[in-house]
Amino acid sequence: MKNTTMNRFTILLATATVGLFLISAGGCASDGKLSAPAREQARLDRANAAYAAGVAAEADGNTTAATNNYKRALISMPDHTPSLRRLATLYTSDEKYGDAIPLWKRLVEATDGDADAYNDLGYTYDLAGFEDPAEAAYLHGIQNDPTNVRIRTNYGLMLARYGRTNEAVLQLRAAMPLADAYYNVAVVLESQGKKAHARREFQHALDSDPDHAEAELHMAAIDFNE
């Protein structure tokens, strides 16, 4: 943990690595003749096939084709969680927060309040500049899984950016050693130009771990530039 940096703890969105499904996307016209379980399986097969095509398109760098395939998957099965996650991730990466947020909400519902889904919803709200909904999403996720490292980390870093340093440390220390929690808060404050406050948090990090090399380097840099 001594070589930690803020980037190590700035956890963004969930990624997915999947194999391709060798499934035909045909058969739509005959679905009405199938039993209910068979119709459900046919819908799932089409969604999986479209999702696999989307993953392949992403691997080739064709995000337009990937987006279209994930949309096709969601037409076949609106609660297809892998497609919801990947499409929302693409929209978030493109800063299309108005398109991404409803998809993250759908993922939260489809996963019965999974903490990672709440994390991604909260993170996207935060990127869009909506502090209160972001905090609400993070808190819901923490309530459902208090041990989730991603959500504790992202929530803590958000609190640090808004100057709520004591609360930030409490969240971060649930995900990492106390010295690293202080260090990450200090890096956020330093990036905002709040050098005096950052120096205080770097000192807290060194008080907790005198061998924390990164905190010591940042302290030296701040002192040198004063």
Image (cartoon, rainbow, N blue to C red):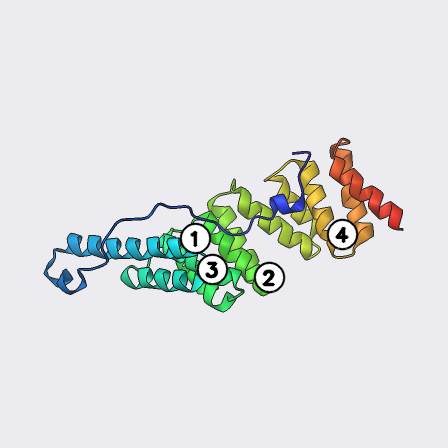
* Residue nearest the viewer, comparing 220 with 167: 220
Calculate the distance from the C-alpha at mark 4 to the C-alpha at mark 1.
37 Å
Q: Residue at x 38, y 46 (%)?
A: 18
Calculate the distance from the C-alpha at mark 3 to the C-alpha at mark 2.
22 Å
Secondary-structure class at tag 1: helix
- From the viewer's perspective, tell me whether residue 72 is left or right of residue 8: left
Q: Residue at x 54, y 42 (%)?
A: 149
Instruction: Specify the amino acid type for callout 2.
Output: Glu
Q: If you read the primary sequence from the N terminus, does the residue marked by circle 3 or circle 2 appear first? A: 3
> Within the image, what quadrant is residue 43 found in?
bottom left
Q: If you read the primary sequence from the N terminus, does the residue marked by circle 3 or circle 4 appear first? A: 3
Label 2: few (<14), some or many (≥20) within 10 Å?
A: some
Residue underneath mark 2: 131
Residue 74 drawn at (x, y percent): 33, 61
Mark 3 and mark 1 in contact (Cβ < 8 Å)? Answer: no
Residue 72 drawn at (x, y percent): 32, 63
Instruction: Specify the amino acid type for callout 3.
Output: Leu
Q: If you read the primary sequence from the N terminus, does the residue marked by circle 2 or circle 4 appear first? A: 2
Residue underneath mark 1: 59
